[in-house]
Each structure stands twice: as structure tokens, then as C-alpha cells.
Image: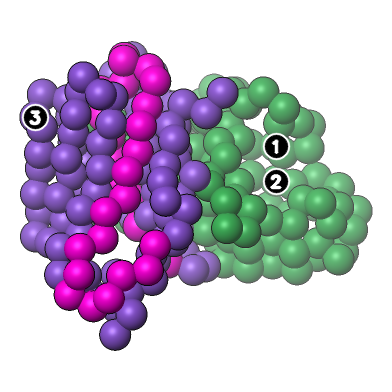
Amino acid sequence: GAVVSQHPSWVICKSGTSVKIECRSLDFQATTMFWYRQFPKQSLMLMATSNEGSKATYEQGVEKDKFLINHASLTLSTLTVTSAHPEDSSFYICSAIGGGGPRGEQFFGPGTRLTVL
Amino acid sequence: QQQVKQSPQSLIVQKGGISIINCAYENTAFDYFPWYQQFPGKGPALLIAIRPDVSEKKEGRFTISFNKSAKQFSLHIMDSQPGDSATYFCAATTEYNFNKFYFGSGTKLNVKP
């Protein structure tokens, strides 16, 4: 149980285009989902926290208009990278809280590798 | 300011040896300390976690040692195997703000056959 999926697992796009990444909790309702960004050989950087039905809370330094987050249901959150540029290339990981796990436990998705040409 | 400091950055251990990764934190309000294992190209997976009411937690070959007074916790991997080769992250969070996980910088473990 407590499985989180992401789609796509990798994407290559041209500079200036927008890319949508989906994060789904497959077998539980996720009250809260998180989006992280990870650069090679570095730790996870929290970008934003999203709660179902409300606006996402962005971390300092993360552009809200650049990284659009929508948490439309208890099982789905989406991250849209708008007008992507090469510097947006990164590994994006979502996680979710819920699933009856211990308080505070986050379940991570497998990640999405974004490459902007 | 880095809330959780992790060391070493990389670690090489012979098969069958003990791998030890250390983390230190500043915020005494932290009350949940998980360790995550991440393989290349994959998301992190929860390995083991501890709360400050105990000083040690063991699950199979993995043990967390927790020193509340020193604000330190460590991961011990006994009988390390090549399949344990991965990057390990410690993290910390609080009951009142469990939305916010503070991650260590990661340790790349290489277990040599």
C-alpha cells in the first residue's frame, strides 16, 4: 500500500513550452502533497506544499507563476512548468501524506526527469 | 541556515562491513527523524524512522541511534551488501509543522563486493 506514481517518468521539451507532471496517490487519499526538485548529487529542495482544494504554499524563492501547482482531488496533484527554459531541467519528485502511515510519513513518487532543450 | 547536517558526503564500505552515517540538527522541536534510501533515477523510499522518545530503533540490518542531548542521530547498516549501494538522506520534522521536512545533504554509499 501507500504507492505514489508520477507521470511522465521523463520528458524532453523545447525551450518556451510548458510541461505538466502528474502525481497520483494510487491506493490512499493524500491530504497533502509536496513537490521537490533535486539537482544531480544534491539533496531534495522543497518547492511547494499543496492541500486538496486550496492554493499551494510555495517556498521562498520559488516562482509561483513559473511552477503552477494544482491539487484538484485527494489523489491527484499536478505541477506545470510554464515557459520552460534549460535551467528548469531537473529531477522533480512529488510526495504525499496519508495512507494510514505513521504521523508525518511521506511517500515519495519515482520522480520525473525534465530536460529542456 | 542548514537545519540538518549530514556526514559523510560519501562512504565506501566492504561487503559485510558496517556503514555509519551521521546527522545533526539544531531545532529541538523536531520530533520525527526518518531516513530515506534513494537509488539513481528513483524517488526516495522510507527506510526507517525514529521519534525522540527512544534512543535506538532497529529494523533488520538497519538501526537508528538517537542522542537527544547531543541533537544527533545516525544510521547503522550492519552486514552491508552491494545492494545497499545508494544515496541515503536523513530528515527531520516537527509535529506542528509536519508539512516541512528538512533533509540532510545526502550520503552516497558504495558497498564493494
Choose mark 3 or mark 1, whichever is in front.
Answer: 3
Q: How far apart, in angstroms, are the residues tagged by discs 3 and 1?
A: 41 Å
Say left or right for A85 vs B56.
Answer: right
Could you tell me which residue is drawn at 17 percent across and 75 percent down?
A: B16
Residue identified by numbered label 3:
B54
Marks 2/1 in contact by CB < 8 Å: the verdict is yes
- Residue found at the very far right of the displayed protein: A16
Label 3 crowding class (10 Å Cα cut-off): few <14, some 14-19, many 20+? few
Name above or below for residue B37 compared with residue A65.
below
Side (left or right) of B86 relative to A76 = left
Q: Which chain is green?
A: A
Give the amino acid at mark 3: Val
Name the residue at the bottom extreme: B113
Residue closer to the observer: A20 or B106: B106
Q: What element carries label 2?
A: strand
The disc label shown at residue B53, or none: none
The disc label shown at residue A80, or none: 2
**Residue B27 picture location, percent across and down:** 37, 17
**Magenta span of residues:** B11-39
A81 sits left or right of B53 in the view = right
Q: State the separation of the CA atoms marked 2 and 1.
A: 5 Å
Q: In this view, does A100 lie above or below B112?
A: above
